[in-house]
Image (cartoon, helix red, strand yellow):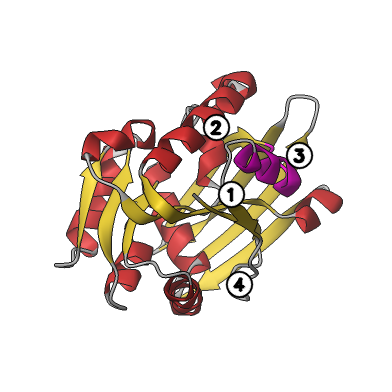
Amino acid sequence: MTLSQQWVILSELMYGSEFIKELADLLRELGVRTIIECGCGGGHVLHGLAERGFTGVGIDADEEMIDIATARHSHPAIEFRKLDWRKARELARTFDAVICRGNSLTNVGGWGKGDIFDPGRCRMEIGRSLKEMLAALKSGGLLYLDTISQHEIDQGGGHLNLSFLGYSMAVDITHDWFRRTRVIEGKGIVRGQQFQNRSLSYLLAPNEMEGLVRGLGVKRVLRPNLAAEPNYDIICAVK
């Protein structure tokens, strides 16, 4: 089982209908109709938003992710494209909202690279990514981001046990603040098939992310809480 396939399964377990409903309510409240989801993965969240009246584009630099999204979650109101979000302006249009969820931003430049992950380069690419995402927004548009929760930081990592309809996963999370690296080690059984994997991402605290966003001159910053998002802290900004 590939890393992309594993992530699609994990994402669908973590982000079910309650999360999509809460996200849709937040977006409506803030006047959003059109969306670009950066790092859309298997596409099920964007598909859920399309079923609730939103339109937009899901982009991901991973070709396998886009193949899965297109095969499983196509909808007349959305399209999926293989595109690195650092090149989002190639879409040649702007949107009411840019969404980058599931701690995806801190994987920029490091997805699938294992132990050759470069935290310094990732930090630089996070800044570049934020500028590109803002460029894809209309004036007054919403930037929706998340990062590891302060709760996870306070407890020095964490452990998750996920079990649903034949899926069984155990996930251990550790922090290395010297290298600014978050390590996720997961193992389990999916449809009778065993898997084990390890991934690394940049350690970015919520207040640090808010500072990066404020430094781009946005009009205001929001810190909404969604009951169905217990794992990450959300930071939103209005362009």
Q: Position of residue 60 (x, y in %)?
A: 33, 43
Which residue in the structure is indicated by mark 1? 186
Asked whether, in this view, residue 24 is left or right of residue 122, the answer is: left
Nearer-the-camera pick, 41 or 26: 26
Residue extent of the magenta highlight? 203-214
Residue type at tag 1: Gly
Q: SS for tag 1?
A: strand
Gap between marks 3 and 1, in whole Å? 15 Å
| Displayed quadrant of residue 132 | top left
Task: Mark 2 or mark 1: name the one nearer the start of the chain.
Answer: 2
Question: Does 152 appear above or below 191?
Answer: above
Nearer-the-camera pick, 159 or 11: 11
Gap between marks 3 and 2, in whole Å? 19 Å
Gap between marks 2 and 1, in whole Å? 25 Å
Gap between marks 4 and 3, in whole Å? 24 Å
Mark 4 touches mark 2? (CB < 8 Å): no
Question: Does 125 appear above or below 185?
Answer: above
Q: Position of residue 46 (x, y in %)?
A: 33, 63
Gap between marks 4 and 2, in whole Å? 24 Å
Q: Which mark is residue 175?
A: 3
Asked whether, in this view, residue 53 is left or right of residue 126, the answer is: left
Q: Which tag is nearer the camera, tag 4 or tag 1?
A: 4
| Displayed quadrant of residue 114 | top right
Name the residue: 72% across, 40% down: 208
Q: Is residue 129 visible?
A: yes
Which residue in the structure is indicated by mark 2? 126
Nearer-the-camera pick, 5 or 35: 35
Q: Which tag is nearer the camera, tag 3 or tag 1?
A: 3
